[in-house]
Image (cartoon, grey):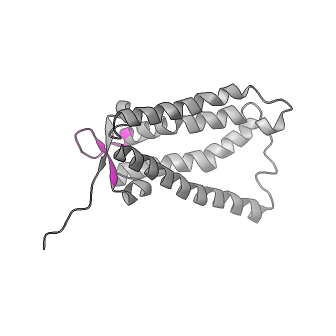
């Protein structure tokens, strides 16, 4: 249970940090350009492309690059976790990309459901909100799977052939 909570906390820390950076950049772009691109994007697919380019892609790269090159994101490093192959070795780029794709799939589905074909806030009657249950159900499934595996392997670790390890601080011998 402890490793599960530590992993979820690391993920939360990563997203809080990413939200501050990426939303900050979005607000800076908005204020520096007098409203661009938000004053020009009105179709769902346009907004989705903007979200993919300025939010999703940087988040994907953060997770992939951090785990491939350093074995951990900042959230994982802070909590002494690392993403490894099942045998404890360094993960490959394909493993980092695969686990990221599966991990962030509910997030991307949420964008698509809310934005395409038309943003929910721009239509008189949005589509059935039942669609949003799909990514939310996936998130619950991910957490349940993580709990059942005592935090060692999440659902996105299985096809990627990875796991997450906890490295407690080593005690120094004096």
Residue 93 part of the magenta segment: yes
Residue 119, by quadrant, is: top right
Residue 52 rendering spot, x and y as whole percentages: 62, 43
Quarter of the rendering occupied by the C terminus: bottom left
Q: Looking at this rendering, what residue extends furthest in the left direction?
A: 174
> Which residue does the image show at 45% across and 40% down from the upper left?
100
> Which residue does the image show at 70% across and 35% down from the upper left?
114
**81 lies above or below 108:** below
Q: Can residue 155 be seen in this view?
A: no
Residue 69 rendering spot, x and y as whole percentages: 36, 53
Q: Looking at this rendering, what residue extends furthest in the right direction?
A: 124
**134 lies above or below 76:** above
Left or right relative to 27: residue 137: left
Residue 96, by quadrant, is: top left
> Which residue does the image show at 77% across and 33% down from the upper left?
118
Q: Looking at this rendering, what residue extends furthest in the front direction?
A: 1
Quarter of the rendering occupied by the N terminus: top left
Residue 108, by quadrant, is: top right
**64 lies above or below 18:** above
How many dots with numbers? 0
* 130 or 122: nearer the viewer: 130
Question: Which stretch appears magenta?
Answer: 81-95
* 48 or 9: nearer the viewer: 9
Residue 46 rendering spot, x and y as whole percentages: 73, 40
* 165 or 146: nearer the viewer: 146
Q: Is residue 145 visible?
A: yes
Residue 88 part of the magenta segment: yes
Residue 17 rendering spot, x and y as whole percentages: 53, 58
> Which residue does the image show at 79% across and 30% down from the upper left?
126
């Amino acid at each position: 249970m402890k490793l599960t909570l530590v992993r979820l906390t690391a993920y939360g820390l990563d997203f809080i940090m990413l939200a501050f950076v990426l939303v900050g950049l979005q607000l800076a772009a908005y204020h520096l350009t007098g409203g661009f691109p938000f004053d020009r994007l009105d179709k769902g697919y346009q907004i989705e492309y903007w979200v993919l380019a300025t939010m999703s892609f940087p988040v994907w790269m953060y997770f992939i690059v951090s785990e491939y090159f350093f074995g951990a994101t900042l959230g994982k490093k802070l909590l002494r976790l690392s993403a490894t192959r099942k045998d404890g070795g360094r993960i490959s780029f394909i493993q980092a990309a695969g686990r990221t794709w599966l991990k962030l799939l509910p997030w991307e589905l949420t964008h698509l459901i809310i934005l395409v074909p038309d943003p929910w806030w721009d239509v008189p009657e949005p589509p059935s909100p039942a669609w949003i249950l799909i990514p939310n159900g996936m998130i619950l499934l991910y957490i349940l799977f993580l709990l059942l595996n005592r935090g060692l392997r999440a659902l996105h670790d299985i096809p990627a052939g990875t796991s997450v390890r906890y490295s407690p601080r080593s005690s120094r011998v004096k």
